[in-house]
Amino acid sequence: MDKVIFIPSAILGLVFIGIYWYRCNKAKKEFNQAVMVNAVLQSSGIVCGLLLVAGTLSDEARKLLNEIDLYIFISGLVVVAASVKGLHKDIFSSTKIEAESRKSSNK
């Protein structure tokens, strides 16, 4: 991972860890290291997602996209999943054919 991506990800991750630590103390909850790791990974996702958006607007940002192939792949999967889910909801779930309708139409 390039430092242009790593440094903002690390800083954002530390901010989220600080917020989590503060909220754990206020709520008198135990600090969970798994949440800490997830905060850093999610921060990296936020930075890379912003870079993907910026890459559509700026040639300089587009040059950095070579460093984040994993996030481009994940983004593609998310777009496919959201599209399939939306189609299923709009086309199949909204026009669900009930079994009762079939029986009454056969009479």
Image (spheres, rainbow, N blue to C red):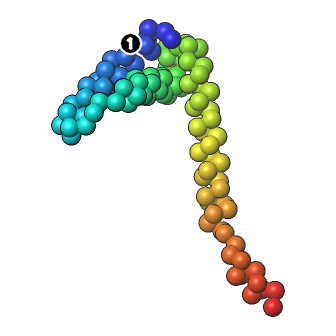
Can residue 54 be seen in this snapshot?
A: no
Disc tally is: 1
Q: Nearer the viewer, residue 59 or 20?
A: 20
Determine whether 78 is above or below 36 in the image: below
Q: Residue furthest bottom?
A: 107
Q: Residue furthest front?
A: 30
Q: Residue furthest left?
A: 26
Identify which amino acid the numbered label 1 is placed on.
Ile
Determine whether 65 is above or below 74 in the image: above
Residue under numbered circle 1? 7
Give percent across and percent down for residue 51.
48, 22
Can residue 60 be seen in this snapshot?
A: yes
For residue 87, side relative to residue 37 (left or right): right
User: Is label 1 in a helix, a strand or a loop?
Assistant: helix
| Residue at 40%, 19% in the rendered image | 9
Quadrant of the rendering where the C terminus is positioned? bottom right
